[in-house]
Structure formats: C-alpha cells, structure tokens
Image (tube, coloured by chain):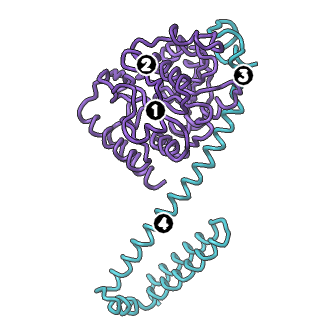
Amino acid sequence: MLGIQVLLITAVLVTGALLVRSTAGDRHQAVRRLLLALLVVLAIASILAPAVVTAVARAVGVGRGTDLLLYCLVIAFLGFVVSSYRKSRLLEAQVTALVRRLALDEAVPPVAARSGPPRREDGGDGPGAARRA
Amino acid sequence: MMGTTPGPPRARGAGETPATPTTEALTAMTLPDEAPARADVADLRHPATWVVVPLYQEASVIGQVVSRVQERFANVVCVDDGSRDASAQAAAEAGAVVVRHCLNLGQGAALQTGFDYALRDPGMRSVVTFDADGQHRVEDAAEMVARLEREDLDVVFGSRFLDRRTRVDPLRRVVLRTAVAFTNRTTGVRLTDAHNGLRVLSRRAAQTVSLRHNRMAHASEIVAQVGRSDLRWAEHPVEILYTDYSRSKGQSLLNSVNILVETLLG
C-alpha cells in the first residue's frame, strides 16, 4: 500500500468520524449519516483503486476521474453552504430570542418608566439610577 | 396627490375615506389644532405612543435626537444594539428609556425588541419607529400619529417620494426605486418608498408584525407582513434630512445586495 493512500484513508476516516459525532440527532440526521458512510466507502475505494473512478467517469461521459471528483465536490460544497446557512440562521434566531429576553427583563418596565420620577434629574449616581425603581 | 397612496390597495388604506387630508390640510396641520379635539389627549406629548429608536454607535448625535423627539413625544425607548461607544449613556442622559442588547444583533432585531417593549405597556396605542441618526423630522412623526388616529389606520409608512421636500441624489434614487419595485412585486403592497425608517404602527400592527430578519431586510419584511395581514395602511409624505452625518452613517449602496440576499434566502 502506498504511503499516500494510508494518509488519505486516515484523513477521510477521521473527518467522517468527526462529522458523525459532532451533529445532534433526529430522523433527518440518520439519513445524513448513511450518506456520509457511503461517501467514506467511496472515498476509500477511489484511493485504493483510482482506475475504477476513471472507469465510472468514462461511463457517465466525463473525461477523467479527477473531473468527476471535482464535480461531486462542488455539489457537496454547495450543499454544505446551504445547510450551514440554514443552521446559522436558526442559531441566530435562538441568540436573538435570548438577547431580547435578557434586554427586556433588565429594562425598566414601560409603565414604571412613564410614571417614574421627572426626567433630566441631575441627582443620583448616573443616568440609569434615577429611573431604576 | 400628496398624502394619498396610489394603486389598488387604496381600498384597504385610508385613501378612499373622505377624511383624506388635502395638501393644505397637511401642511397646515399642527398638534394644537389637532389634539384638543380628543379628550384623552390632554397631554400633547402623545402619552399613548412609544417612539422606538434603534440605536447603534450614535453617541455623538443620539442625545440631541432624543431631546428633539421628547419635545413632542413623552415616551421614547432607545434599543441599544450592543454599542461599544457611549450611545446608551447619552440616550439615557437625554431622558430616553434604554433597553440594551448585550450583543449586536442588527436593526431589525432592535426594532422588534422595541415593539415587544412597547407592547408591555397596556396603555400603548401606537408605536413610532424613528432612526437614531437624526434624519427624520419629529413633526412628520407627530403628523403620522395624528393621521393614524384620525383615519383609524394600523400602519402609516413614511415616504420621501410623495413630495419634493427631500432631494435624493440620482444614484441613491435609482437604488431606492429598484428596492421599491422589488418590494412592491414581492409583497403586493404598493409603496413609493421601501426603506424609510419612519413609520407608525397601531397596537394591533405591533402585535401582528414579527421581524425575523435581524439585519437590514426588516424594512421589506414589515411591508410583506402588512401585505399578508388585514391591517389598514397608508403612506405619508415625510422629509429626510440628509446631513453629512447621516450620509456617512447611512446604508452604503452595496448594502442593498445584502438586503436582496437576505430576502431571497429567507
């Protein structure tokens, strides 16, 4: 076995394991993991037998195996971009809810604020102090 | 011409009601003529209205802006969106209530927090959204609140294109017009100005609107949600005061790309 093959297989396995472990799960997740396992097998196969990838590429009308890999990679990357955008939007929504809740809980309630002491008071130690009931 | 909303949605907006103000009525309209007619508006400084000012890094002007707003509106809440300068302090010193986001979330998120805050006041009847950089006129806001009450509307959108007071430079005009065309096409609400920060929402409208776009796409989002609802709306002519300061702080034209992407990718 060539040194480069050992290195690549190790890299693919480690990446695969990391990806499987780091995601939180439900039914949706299981499908993703199966696809990921398939990808790992294919990656190893292509490293062990590059000629097979070229043969597959020829069969589907793409010139070289490398080109086929590149196309697959582009598609996978775009999928990743979309799913990570969705995930970050979800995360953003959660952070927003949290920050908003915190902001509103810390603020002087509107009813207290409107009936509070007269504004522009110079007494007290700081602008907030006057209105903090 | 002035003060009316062109297009079919007029039927839902105020345009069709006989109370539509004429040009003269609008320009002559001042609070002393308007307010005493209502028994519950003893205090001329709109006790049932909250002015929501989304605030981010505007320490040099916010105090002045808050003071000006308070000449006509008693209740001002500045939603400080995680400013690292003295914005929050300056706003509080000028007499505004300050609600602080501990992280910077964006203007849309700040507006929504302001709506949520105002909704905690059971006596609140309307909310004004007002930019922190001083580009809006408080008189316009007061007229818009009066119009909301008088014509029983839910939303009054400010528009700088309904009269000739605001001089918009050609490039900005093209971008704003494109944004309007896009918003009109996607939301079904026909406005003349899509990204104007001056609006008045009734309590019902504030309850209905739920902004999910934290950054800049919230302007189209409000319009879209109003379009999907049965809220009654109208546009009102306002003047935008393009100062060197607001110009330097204002949205760069490139930002419209961001707005477009946020809107499309939802």
Identity of the residue furthest to the front in this view: B18
For mark 1, give the secondary structure.
Answer: strand
- Tell me the colour chain A is drawn in: cyan
- CA–CA distance in space, label 3 to label 1: 30 Å
Q: Mark 4 = which residue?
A: A80
Q: Residue B234, labelled with which disc?
A: 1
Task: Please state the chain letter of the residue tagged with numbered disc 3 in the rendered image.
Answer: A
Q: Quadrant of the N terminus of chain B?
A: top left
Task: Please state the chain letter of the residue tagged with numbered disc 1 in the rendered image.
Answer: B
**Amino acid type at image mark 3:** Val
Say if mark 3 contacts mark 1, CB within 8 Å: no
**Chain coloured purple:** B
In the foreground, B91 or B261: B261
In the foreground, B58 or B192: B192
Residue drawn at point x = 69 percent, y = 24 percent? B123
> Can residue B93 be seen by looking at this rendering?
no
